[in-house]
Amino acid sequence: MPKNNKSAGLRSPTSIQGKFIGQMSVTSGLIIATYSSASPQRANAKLNGKTLVFSPIASSKLGSIVWKCQPDAGTVPQRFLPTICKKGSN
């Protein structure tokens, strides 16, 4: 798995943003999304700076990679986790 954004062929972490995410980084194969409540992002202020971590799982049946939420690896409080992270399966 890629060690960082550059080795994954991605732009720098702060160049990858979304409606609620201020940056997205690849670290030793993990994807780490960091929430931001600073404009233009609109995350809940309680999530500002909190992280959500996804780990890759190779799927021999599908011949692809499945990304699994790792709720204990990030810093998002349990009550704010996406449903898929609370269930523990994709």
Image (cartoon, rainbow, N blue to C red):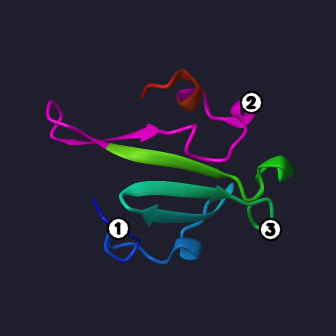
Q: Quadrant of the C terminus?
A: top left
Helix, strand or loop under label 3: loop
Comparing marks 1 and 3, which lies closer to the viewer?
A: 1
Comparing marks 1 and 2, which lies closer to the viewer?
A: 1
Side of 27 relative to 8 (left or right): right
Q: Is residue 19 visible?
A: no
Q: Amino acid at mark 1?
A: Lys
Residue 56 screen position, x and y as percent: 34, 46
Across the whole image, how many numbered discs are drawn on residues?
Answer: 3
The residue where tag 1 is placed is: 3
- Magenta segment boundaries in residue numbering: 57-84
Task: Looking at the picture, tell me which residue is in the foreground, 10 or 46.
Answer: 46
The residue where tag 3 is placed is: 39
Q: Earlier in the sequence, mark 3 or mark 2?
A: 3
Q: Quadrant of the N terminus?
A: bottom left
Q: Is residue 21 magenta?
A: no
Side of 23 relative to 41 (left or right): left
The residue where tag 2 is placed is: 79
Helix, strand or loop under label 2: helix
Whether residue 72 is situated above or below residue 11 in the rendered picture: above
Q: CA distance from mark 3 to mark 2?
A: 23 Å
Q: Amino acid at mark 2?
A: Arg
Task: Looking at the picture, tell me which residue is in the foreground, 41 or 66.
Answer: 66
Helix, strand or loop under label 1: loop
Q: Amino acid at mark 3?
A: Ser
Side of 2 relative to 26 (left or right): left
